[in-house]
Image (spheres, grey):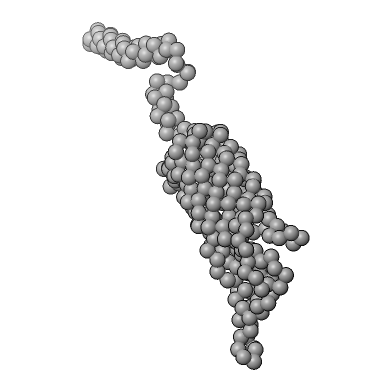
Amino acid sequence: MNLNLSQLAGAQHRVLGKLGLCLAALAMAAIAPRSALAEDVKGDPTYNGSQPIDGELDKYWNAEQKVTSLQNPMYERKGGFEAALHFGVVPNDSFYFPKAVGGRLGYFLTDTLSVEGGFSYLLNGNSDLQAFLIAVPGGKNGPTDLTKGAKKVPQMKWLSSVDLAWAPLHGKIGIFASKLSNFDLGFVGGVGIIGANIDTSADGDSVPESKVKVGGHWGATMRFYLTRWLNVRWDYRQFLYFPDQGKPFLAPVEFTLGLAFLTK
């Protein structure tokens, strides 16, 4: 009986030993390919110390999260022409309220520097002050026209300019997290040319003469790009000119909004 128990215990130990050897062999078989793959990856010159799956995930997520910095204007403009159509107002004339309709044409010497010429035809309407002076209520025979017998104020008919424009400020805008556009802000200065009806008489009895006056102007411009070749453009201009000898200078301000087309 004791012999049988001893034989049974020996057989049990042999079975457990063989089972352990089998498990160890299986473990080594599973580890060996992974070690070989790791050695192969480490031999790759692009290996950065991370596991292969981490490298693949890095490639995916880096591509998704990468955002290009806008160091230069998004669109190249050097050597290109820009044509703009605009509509605007001249709000600081005390006696008239001119509405401006016109356009501009420019050529880019660099991506930020351009030469430009502009023209605006003015559609004049009387301001509230002028309308009051023409028909002052309270007279015995009805409204009184106080402008009769008085020297008439200058009435601008058109504005023109030749200037140098510099747009050193630019930025980018993300629209609905799917479209990237950009804008720029610049400054302009140059020669302003104004066509106006000017009363040169002493008592206002003569008809105002049509004259061309040359002065200066400065301002600012802002573009918001809708596409590569189309942008919405806002412009501010202030002109300086002397309507008559010995008279104070006038400083009309023009605000315009329009569409500009770039050929580059």
Residue 66, position as x, y percentages in the image: 47, 32
Q: Residue at x 69, y 65 (%)?
A: 200
In this view, the residue in front, 202 or 91, is: 202
Residue at x 71% of width, y 60% of height:
244
Residue 230: image location, x then y, percent: 44, 44
Q: Is residue 36 left or right of residue 252?
A: left
Q: Residue at x 63, y 66 (%)?
A: 208
Q: Residue at x 42, y 23 (%)?
A: 55
Is residue 193 in view?
yes
Q: Is residue 254 visible?
A: no
User: Looking at the image, which residue sits at the far front?
Assistant: 206
Residue 66 vs residue 96, the one in the foreground: 96
Taking the image as shown, residue 247 lies to the left or right of residue 129, namely right
Out of 111 and 114, give the one closest to the viewer.
114
Q: Farthest right residue?
A: 246
> Does residue 36 sit above or below 114 in this rendering?
above
Report how many numbered discs are placed on residues in the image. 0
In this rendering, would 86 be left or right of 150?
left
Is the residue 7 above or below the residue 153 in the image? above
Tell me where residue 170 sits by quadrant: top right
Quadrant location of the N terminus? top left
Image quadrant in which the C terminus is located? top left
Quadrant of residue 238 in the image?
A: bottom right
Considering every residue shown, the one lying at the far bottom of the view is 140
* Above/below status of 43 relative to 127: above
Q: Residue 79 location in percent, x, y? A: 50, 33
Q: Position of residue 32 (x, y in %)?
A: 35, 11
